Image (cartoon, grey):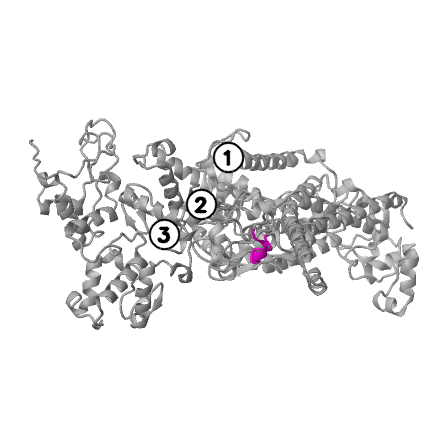
């Protein structure tokens, strides 16, 4: 017997059943009308319209609407941008409005190997416009604005050497001239007064960086960094260059492009003469000799050249044979090794083979970023509040008056941590001279001392 | 019309081979459905009319069971797309959202059903307490229920880590740190949970195995025994039950007032043949139909929530970038609030006391008063104490959720304190 109360419940069954059925349909319905399908259909309509013959038209009509993706194994990414941007590889779509347009020069960096997000950033796995362009919460790498796209080149290439990215080279030049690494570490070398810059491109927006260069104290409370005195165009270039410091792990396949074209010869020699049989780079090679990844941090270029010429004389007891290299070959190999381990290749090898010690010293001054505190012409003048030295970093033009060469060497190696305060009741001065022992090679140190000693204007004598 | 269709199918050889007994048409058949059907044999042939009323139990136990079934079904489907590796997990969550058909709704269903299940299990516990349905002979079933409650929390906690985003990573870091505060065994306990000293690859695979294999298997076992005990303890607790059921009944004592089509000699304390008032109706279709309606309603609620609200997914887990504040999952936030007062007393002693109090409750409170009655006046002390504890737990959880900002400082929810931000 059916309870009469049961009959009253029958309509509920119908209602709930229809509701659940409707909700299930709704859940799948949302899926059917994904926005990327609309864009692909438009692309396919274009394909059909462009078909010349009925066979081509039939072929185009059979093309499926589906997800397009580039799966990269080494940087472990999946880029689905081509799902909406379906014509990126088809030159006949050049000039059309996005997302139907062709990507210029796409064959230079084939998408199957590079994907899209390595350069353009954004969220490759997404298939909606907002999410894929990274303009959503919880994604901190949105699409780069096109005006900053050159910064991506520096992830794999040496900045000074990309013909199609002149702003990047300019940015690097401004970076080196301003002596940023005098206070900031980059790739393991530099000063310790400011924070490291290895990931600053990933953590700060370009707008922040630009404001920071113009007036650091306005952006970071209590900053001792002086404003970078450069024009607007130079600051834009500097921002673009600094944006390339993303610290993204990229495998050797990509990073191996960090060579100057002149060093391609060195790279070829490196492989032809059998160096990988004893030495390794990026983990690939032999283990008899030391890995060469950071060799430029341990030895200056003269040491490397001398070592190539006569390994036994420089490293007694070594089993490295004499290779009887010509002058050209030695320079090429040295250039290759330098560019591998030091992305801030100062123009030592871009300039003539012979330089005077003073000229080399000037390059060392630039290499270690002394200009960041002591000024581009060693004139000093950077504000250092409450420092006894007239509340500014002292200039170096007259060091020959106050120091002997040995004293100057000692001062550079030891640094000066405690800066005498003008007013002992106020906080101590923020900028100090860091110790360069262990960071500067012997040959570089003597050249630097020569350079500094040479700065005193001739014929002038200070009276104290 | 459906009945006619069904009957014609039943008439065929194929139909008869699958369904040994057709749709019940007579009372005999309705009674037989309880033993002739595999799926329905865990229900008795007849139930008290009281059991049909929604307000008797609010169906909370059933809802918890249905949510468990929904979670199992959606969970299996999710397992097709998820690999428990730190390199893959987060990316698989993204793929579910962007590539898998109805992937986002599937994930949402799993997450909202999980939160609902924790809530419904707690409500079910409260209902059983307030109707004194833990008193003898149902003490052990209460204990099973408390174990199931702890298993529900464990299932939710292990599942929380699997998306491997910032929310998951730091919630589990906080949770396992609280476990580490236990004296003597704390650090070893934490190491056992994590398979290491930090939340990493080992913790992920460990939590995954617990979440998809070990805990569901144990939970299913406990659920089976829990439901079986409901039957054997005489069905839903009712005020009309006889008070004393401990003595062994002799056959001669049974009043011979009814016959069944099945042969069962009633001995021992269960079932309660002839001991309860005869206000019974057939399970089929009265109870079954209502259970089906409740199932549809539960599924409808879960679907509505899943279509309307997306499960959260923050940035990928980053061990060097803790959020401030780092919060445990919501059901542990009351605990975290307690821990912020004292790691030992708040994080170890109080929760242990609560669990022991719950487990021992039916053995401490044996007075057979107010069984089957909501908020019985005779039990007002017990109800008062329980309600106080419940309200305290809720208040602490609310404080931990809404009133705690960076560095666990007190903040008004609508005037959040500025967290330490990077320049952007």
Task: Give how far across and how far down residue B322 sits, in percent.
Answer: 45, 44
The chain that hosts pointer 1 is B
Residue at the extreme front: A52
Q: Nearer the viewer, mark 2 or mark 1?
A: 2
Q: Which residue is mark 3?
A: A159
Q: Can residue B25 be seen from the camera position used here?
A: no
> Tag 3: Cα neighbours inside 10 Å, few (<14), some, or many (≥20)?
many
Which mark identifies residue A148?
2
Q: Position of A248 compared to B280: left or right?
A: left
Q: Which residue is mark 1?
A: B404
- In the rendered structure, are the residues bearing label 3 and label 1 in contact, judged by CB atoms less than 8 Å apart? no
Q: In this view of the protein, which residue sits in the foreground, A170 or B373? A: A170
Secondary structure of residue under mark 1: loop
- In the rendered structure, are the residues bearing label 3 and label 2 in contact, judged by CB atoms less than 8 Å apart? no
Q: CA distance from mark 2 to mark 1?
A: 40 Å
Q: Can residue A54 be seen from the camera position used here?
A: yes
Q: CA distance from mark 3 to mark 1?
A: 47 Å
**Chain-order first, disc 3 or disc 2:** 2
Q: Which residues are magenta?
A: A85-94
């Amino acid at each position: 017997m059916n309870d009469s109360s049961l009959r009253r419940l029958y309509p509920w069954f119908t209602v709930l059943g229809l509701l659940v059925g409707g909700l299930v349909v709704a859940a799948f319905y949302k899926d059917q009308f994904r926005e990327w399908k609309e864009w692909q259909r438009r692309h396919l309509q274009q394909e059909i319209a462009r078909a010349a013959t009925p066979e081509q038209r039939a072929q185009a009509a059979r093309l499926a609407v589906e997800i397009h993706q580039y799966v990269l194994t080494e940087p472990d990414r999946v880029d689905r941008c081509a799902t909406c941007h379906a014509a990126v590889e088809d030159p006949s779509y050049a000039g059309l409005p996005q997302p139907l347009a062709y990507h210029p020069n796409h064959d230079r960096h084939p998408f199957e190997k590079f994907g899209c997000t390595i350069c353009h950033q954004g969220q490759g796995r997404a298939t909606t416009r907002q999410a894929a362009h990274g303009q959503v919460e919880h994604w901190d790498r949105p699409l780069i604005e096109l005006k900053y796209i050159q910064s991506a080149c520096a992830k794999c290439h040496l900045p000074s050497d990309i013909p199609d990215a002149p702003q990047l080279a300019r940015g690097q030049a401004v970076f080196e001239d301003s002596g940023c690494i005098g206070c900031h570490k980059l790739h393991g070398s530099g000063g310790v007064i400011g924070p490291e810059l290895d990931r600053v491109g990933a953590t700060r927006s370009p707008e922040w960086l630009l404001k920071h260069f113009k007036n650091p104290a306005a952006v970071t409370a209590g900053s001792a960094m002086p404003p970078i005195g450069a024009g607007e165009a130079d600051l834009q270039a500097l921002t673009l260059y600094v944006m390339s410091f993303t610290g993204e792990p990229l495998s050797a396949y990509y990073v191996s492009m960090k060579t100057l074209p002149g060093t391609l010869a060195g790279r070829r020699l490196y492989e032809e003469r059998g160096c990988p049989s004893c030495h390794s780079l990026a983990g690939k090679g032999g283990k008899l000799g030391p890995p060469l990844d950071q060799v430029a941090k341990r030895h200056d270029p003269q040491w490397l050249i001398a070592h190539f010429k006569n390994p036994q004389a420089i490293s007694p007891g070594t089993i490295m044979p004499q290779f009887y290299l010509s002058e050209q070959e030695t320079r090429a190999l040295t250039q290759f090794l330098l560019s591998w381990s030091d992305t801030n290749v100062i123009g030592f090898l871009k300039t003539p083979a012979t330089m005077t010690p003073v000229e080399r010293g000037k390059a060392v001054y630039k290499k270690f970023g002394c200009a960041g505190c002591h000024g581009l012409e060693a004139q000093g003048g950077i504000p250092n509040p409450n420092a006894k030295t007239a509340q500014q970093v002292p200039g170096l033009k007259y060091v020959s008056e106050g120091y002997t060469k040995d004293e100057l060497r000692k001062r550079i190696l030891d640094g000066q941590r405690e800066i005498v305060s003008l007013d002992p009741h106020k906080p101590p001065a923020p900028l100090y001279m860091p110790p360069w022992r262990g960071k500067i090679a012997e040959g570089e140190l003597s050249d630097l001392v020569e350079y500094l000693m040479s700065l005193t204007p001739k014929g002038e004598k200070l009276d104290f | 019309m459906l009945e006619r269709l069904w009957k014609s199918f039943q008439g065929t050889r194929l139909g008869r081979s699958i369904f040994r007994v057709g749709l019940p048409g007579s009372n005999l058949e309705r009674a037989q459905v309880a033993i002739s059907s595999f799926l329905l044999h865990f229900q008795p042939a007849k139930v008290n009319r009281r059991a049909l009323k929604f307000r008797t139990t609010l169906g909370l136990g059933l809802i918890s069971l249905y949510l468990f079934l929904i979670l199992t079904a959606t969970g299996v489907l999710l397992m097709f797309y998820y690999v428990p590796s730190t390199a893959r997990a987060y990316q698989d969550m993204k793929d579910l959202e962007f590539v898998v058909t109805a992937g986002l709704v599937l994930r949402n269903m799993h997450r909202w059903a999980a939160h609902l299940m924790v809530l419904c299990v707690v409500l079910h516990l409260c209902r059983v307490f307030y109707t004194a349905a833990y008193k003898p002979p149902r003490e052990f079933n209460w204990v099973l229920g408390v174990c199931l409650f702890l298993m529900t929390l464990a299932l939710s906690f292990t599942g929380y880590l699997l998306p491997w985003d910032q929310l998951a990573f730091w919630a589990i870091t906080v949770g396992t740190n609280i476990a580490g505060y236990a004296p003597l065994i704390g650090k070893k306990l934490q190491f056992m949970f994590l398979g290491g000293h930090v939340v990493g690859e080992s913790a992920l695979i460990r939590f995954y195995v617990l979440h998809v294999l070990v805990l569901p298997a144990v939970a299913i076992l406990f659920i089976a025994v829990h439901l079986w005990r409901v039957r054997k303890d005489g069905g839903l607790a009712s005020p009309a039950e006889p008070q004393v059921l401990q003595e062994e009944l002799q056959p001669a004592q049974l009043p011979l007032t009814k016959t069944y089509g099945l042969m069962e000699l009633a001995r021992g304390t269960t079932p309660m043949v002839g001991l309860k008032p005869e206000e019974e109706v057939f399970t089929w279709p009265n109870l079954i139909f209502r259970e089906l309606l409740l199932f549809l309603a539960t599924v409808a609620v879960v679907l509505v929530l899943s279509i309307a609200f997306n499960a959260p997914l923050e940035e990928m887990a980053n061990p060097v970038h803790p959020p401030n504040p780092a919060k445990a999952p919501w059901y542990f936030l009351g605990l975290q609030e307690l821990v912020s007062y004292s790691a030992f007393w708040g994080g170890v002693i109080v929760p242990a006391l609560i669990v022991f109090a719950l487990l021992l409750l039916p053995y401490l409170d044996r007075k057979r008063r107010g069984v089957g009655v909501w908020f019985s006046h005779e039990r007002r002390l017990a109800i008062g104490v329980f309600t106080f504890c419940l309200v305290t737990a809720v208040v602490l959880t609310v404080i931990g959720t809404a009133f705690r900002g960076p560095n666990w400082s007190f903040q008004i929810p609508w005037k959040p304190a500025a967290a330490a931000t990077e320049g952007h």
